[in-house]
Amino acid sequence: MWNSYNTADYSGMIAETIRIPGPDGEPIRAYYSRPIGDGPFPGIVLIPHMPGWDEFSWEISRRFTQHGYSVLCPNIYEKFGHGTPPDVAKSVREQGGVSDESVMKDVEGSLSFLRSQVTANGKVGVIGMCSGGRHTFLAACTVPGIDAAVDCWGGGVVPDPNRPSQGKAPVDYSENLQCPLLGIFGNDDMFPTPDLVDKLEEVLKDLGKDYTFYRYDGAPHGFWGYNGPNYRPEAAIDSFNKAVAFFDEHLKV
């Protein structure tokens, strides 16, 4: 939990960019943040959101490391070139976005990397915000070996009737959801809207899946984003605490 550490305890971490095997054997960059010490530490794969493999994603990685997690945030946009995160995001949009298949392979590679570390405890969760939340839900249904998943306001998990969609939506894979799921949503969000979150919850409930949703009044899309107008401090801290507690329950065992 936020500010739950003992001030007499030692705290330290290492955070750096590394390379891991990506799709088709080509290496991709990843931001790797982990505690200093022998462990064993649980792992988290943090899937970036559409604004890119950006400073916000790196900071959230370090936040989880402060709570005892080795976190790997893969650059799922590696093949689109390099530059500032806004430049890369522009290139991704102009080229039609990254494929689900490519992201799932990056998640698989990230899981393998985290589990192979000598300080690992063998448990790995996945978290993502916005499009990363959508990818998180899809990974929890299609990528073997995930122990817990946190979907933060993932748009497009359930198709929006007002937006064009192609092929199967992540919700169509719900029957294969293989791990506990935590959902964090704002009730002022427009993608997903509260109605779409209701539909997702109905599907999961009917299937008897292990899930918990938290919804925040007055919170719009991306309310963890302290660098923009959608930031809602109280909802952000409360929901971050819930995400840490959820991972603690399922990964620190």
Image (tube, rainbow, N blue to C red):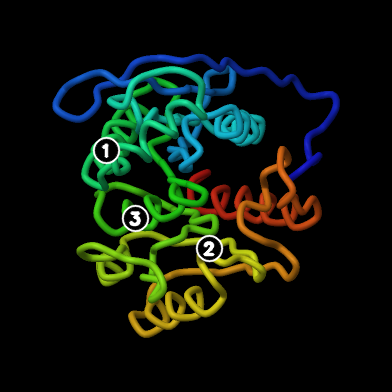
- Where residue 152 sits in the image (x, y, percent)? 54, 55
Q: Name the residue under label 2.
A: 183
Report the disc number at residue 166: none
Location of mark 3 (residue): 140
Res. 14 image quadrant: top right
- Counting residues from the start of the chain, the first of labels 3 and 1 encountered is 1
Instruction: Please identify the residue farthest to the front as the structure is shown.
Output: 94
Cα gap from disc 1 to disc 2, whole angstroms? 22 Å
Q: Which residue is drawn at 50% across and 52% down?
A: 130
Q: Which amino acid does label 1 sit on?
A: Glu
Residue 192 higher or lower than 28, as above or below: below
Judge by depth and name the residue closer to the eye, 75 or 205: 75
Relative image position of residue 69 (x, y in whole percent): 55, 33
Hey, which quadrant is residue 95 in on the image? top left
Q: Which of marks 1 and 2 is nearer the N terminus?
A: 1
Give how far apart the Cα atoms at labels 3 and 2 are. 12 Å
Asked if disc 3 and disc 2 are in contact, CB closer than 8 Å, the reply is no
- The residue under the point 38% across, 57% down is 137
Q: Percent x, y for residue 238?
A: 74, 56
* Neighbour tally class for label 3: few under 14, some 14-19, many 20 plus, Cα within 10 Å: many
Q: What element carries label 2?
A: strand
Q: Using the image as rendered, state which of residue 132 and residue 80 is in the foreground.
A: 80
Residue at x 45% of width, y 29% of height: 72
Instruction: Please name the residue that numbered disc 1 is placed on.
Output: 108
| Separation of marks 3 and 1 at Cα, in angstroms | 11 Å
Three-letter amino acid code of the residue under disc 3 = Ala
Crowding at dot 2, Cα within 10 Å, few <14 / some 14-19 / many 20+, comes out as many
Residue at the outermost left position: 24
Element class at badge 3: helix
Q: Residue at x 67, y 17 (%)?
A: 12
Q: Where is residue 21 in the image (x, y as percent from the top left)?
A: 25, 22
Mark 1 is surrounded, within 10 Å at the Cα level, by few (under 14), some (14 to 19) or many (20 or more) other residues, namely: many
